Amino acid sequence: MLVKHGVVIGLGRLTSQLPSSSSVLRRQQFLIRALCGSQIHRPKLIRAMSSTSEADAESVLRTVTPSLDLKRHKGQAGKIAVIGGCREYTGAPYFAAISALKIGADLSHVFCTKDAAPVIKSYSPELIVHPVLEESYSISQLSEEDQRTVQDKVLGEVDKWMERFDCLVIGPGLGRDPFLLECVSKIMLLAKKSNVPFVVDGDGLFLVTNSIDLVNSYPLAVLTPNVNEYKRLVQKVLNCEVDEQNAEDQLRSLAKQIGGVTILRKGKSDLISNGETVKSVSIYGSPRRCGGQGDILSGSVAVFLSWAQQLKAGPESPSETPAILGCIAASGLLRKAASLAFTKHKRSTLTSDIIECLGKSLEDICPAS
Amino acid sequence: MLVKHGVVIGLGRLTSQLPSSSSVLRRQQFLIRALCGSQIHRPKLIRAMSSTSEADAESVLRTVTPSLDLKRHKGQAGKIAVIGGCREYTGAPYFAAISALKIGADLSHVFCTKDAAPVIKSYSPELIVHPVLEESYSISQLSEEDQRTVQDKVLGEVDKWMERFDCLVIGPGLGRDPFLLECVSKIMLLAKKSNVPFVVDGDGLFLVTNSIDLVNSYPLAVLTPNVNEYKRLVQKVLNCEVDEQNAEDQLRSLAKQIGGVTILRKGKSDLISNGETVKSVSIYGSPRRCGGQGDILSGSVAVFLSWAQQLKAGPESPSETPAILGCIAASGLLRKAASLAFTKHKRSTLTSDIIECLGKSLEDICPAS
């Protein structure tokens, strides 16, 4: 069966109607693969046939989460880096980075400004925090040439680590300093050059909305806008207002217009599209809207996306892209954890309480052993 | 019996066949000691007879852990110092230093750079943190002569404490700054001059792999490489690749080639050798590979090694060196604690969770009263 754990997938839908004889099935599968080229995870012709549907997030979580194995060594379960954290904001990058570890990543880095680093470090000794980014106020006295030298140094500090990372999260607590954002736009180019996937959230979305080319047609980019960020993105890219009546079609058009990036539109239901398929995740979360939950989500997408990338292509493998699977899994897990935290803490539920529930929520869905 | 708690030991093997009459036994032991010089813990001729075997880590833990006594005063249960912690890394030295305390050491110091100190201090008021190390960026404007003055000052700050320490841990979160590493190589010389044992891990192993002379033939040095660090060490010292088929013989050769230092090769099973004996510790740990577990291990080896050094020579004493005993005990305890933490936290197990389980794990094996 190509439909695994109830994940409704384009390839699965088609092939589940094929003759059951295994030799015929294999031949049909070969034809389908030939039609789709080498992109076993992205069968474009077929996915175009799929329509919006509620994803079975728990099944996706079970599919993408790797089994634990004593033979594996440090790093193989994921190395994530958050680009964010400045003089003003330090909580957001911490939430994203610690969430990645709590889900099961092995290593979680943060690249932030010099002012933010000691604070983020002090939140947890588990994170590796690099104080390498610079804001305008610290370089405004320098000549243009010296400013370029500083920028090159920043980029060098990030790039020497780039190939070690399975996914970046760009934006939590980034702020809007022009010099900093220029550096971050170049970090995106470096990530693309090294084929490292990235999730863009918060102020990273401000940057991207103003410079769509930064992510355009990069299939490993995921955008996770909230209501306001989505509104600005729609206005800028589709040149219209948000259409709640045709939310799914509009999201599909938006993702297609940006060349097939994956967008997770946060809301009462989370909607996910890469310009072809559209999935929703609506399982019950929490009515608390305390700040920081988006940071848990972005860190979680990074982990699940990188795990989904490790799934081996085969007749049992899901046909959705790793980015779509990562979004579904992260959305489902955050909702479960928020619900559990709310049961315990009610109105006083904070983001840290939800993070503390990530482990148990994942364990309930997908036991470690 | 010289074989205590099932620890298979060279001296034990020989002397357990001796006549049981106590006066004859004492005379025989005198002769053995005379043959082995003053190194009662390192009877080379005899240990060469021992072969690889699974160590009974729980018995070693019971043997080396001192009983608690109201008459003892602060410091007698161990004074450990971690050399590590720089602008980038602060978690690793904290994990090593706090683990030493959680196992039962009385005092735990950290010598780190000025930037790292406030952060490491903020993790815990239990640690004594000395902000004395310097990185290149803070001294690059100085003349060569002034740089030497800075180095002398750094060395003076560490050396004035040296004789108070029972063991150093060199490397957790050290980074790879050239000026810093040069200072640390001189700290190793100071430790050797004062006969203070040291455990080398992380970036300390990067330093040692490039300058084997720093540890060569120092019997109180312990190296604790992971997969990659071990690979580089084998390539550099033995000029070949890692041979998994003959892992134990290769480890023995490597340790012998470095003049009998003790090496704890971390892996699915931990392998320990000083060029003569080879021991393995394979008891079940945890499948989580979150960063920081190596720091717990290095801090633990330091404590158990220093406790093992306090064991009085006598007919009941184990013949393995304190370094070998320290490695076996630390490996066993970390595995127990990781297993306990994993039972509680599953995929969300972090290094801090394992540290929280060190106390209970030791208590289960070796009750305090």
Image (cartoon, coloured by chain):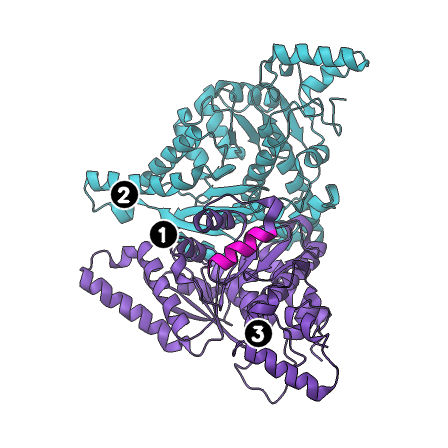
Chain colours: A cyan, B purple
Q: Chain of mark 1?
A: A
Q: Are marks 1 and 2 in contact (CB under 8 Å)?
A: no
Q: Position of residue A368 (x, y in %)?
A: 72, 45
Give the amino acid at mark 3.
His
Q: Nearer the viewer, mark 3 or mark 2?
A: 3
Along the line of sight, the residue nearer the viewer: B304 or A172: B304
Q: Position of residue B128 (x, y in %)?
A: 45, 72
Q: Is residue A211 above or below residue A43?
A: below
Identified at 72% across, 87% down, the residue is B22
**Residue under circle 1?**
A114
**Residue under circle 2?**
A150
Identified at 47% across, 57% down, the residue is B257
Please tell me how crowded label 1 is: few (under 14), some (14-19), or many (20+) other residues with Cα within 10 Å.
many
Q: Chain of mark 2?
A: A
Which residues are the magenta region? B248-258
Image position of B53 (left or right of B142): right
Q: Between marks 3 and 2, how big is the CA–CA gap?
A: 56 Å
Along the line of sight, the residue nearer the viewer: B171 or A279: B171
